[in-house]
Image: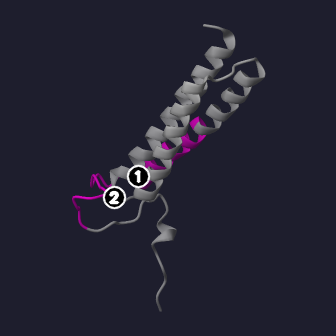
Amino acid sequence: MTAPGRWALGAAGCGGASVVLLAAVAAAGDSAAVPGLGAATWHPPWDAGLHPRSGAVSAVLAVAYLLGAAAVALGLVAVRRGARPGPVAVGVAAVGCCGVALTSLEFPLSPAVFTAETT
């Protein structure tokens, strides 16, 4: 494997790990980052009901954000050093981005979206 390929592989690994951690926090259930979604249903959004502690959620989200930033940085270094993705890789990335977009619609990560103060 060439040096640019190693950078690109590192970028893909960091990006994938970041998405997995974000999805895990969203699917874990009520927490500091995810609002209560009500009773479990047969359709999304699903809630595992783990009720993780706020400190753990904050730590996992911080690691996920740092991994995402590392993925962007490593990807830019790989391109700078000559890595060029092939058409299949671009297609896989496009499908992955669509999956992430759909997941973000299913698993909200912000209680501010769903809470409203009533007086």
In the displayed structure image, the side of residue 86 where residue 58 appears, left or right: left
Name above or below for residue 45 compared with residue 65. Answer: below
In the image, residue 83 lies at what x, y percent? 69, 19
Q: Which residue is mark 2?
A: 45
Instruction: Give residue 108's quadrant in the image.
Output: bottom left
Does residue 39 appear in this view?
yes
Q: Which residue is mark 1?
A: 26
Does residue 33 appear in this view?
no
In the displayed structure image, the side of residue 74 where residue 111 appears, left or right: left
Name above or below for residue 39 compared with residue 58. Answer: below
Name above or below for residue 35 compared with residue 51. Answer: below
The local crowd at label 1, few if under 14, some if 14 to 19, many if 20 or more residues have their Cα within 10 Å, is: many
Residue type of the residue flagged with mark 1 = Ala
In the image, residue 9 lies at what x, y percent? 57, 20
Q: Residue at 49% of width from left, 83% of height from top?
A: 117
In the image, residue 95 lies at what x, y percent? 49, 39
Q: Which residues are magenta?
A: 39-67
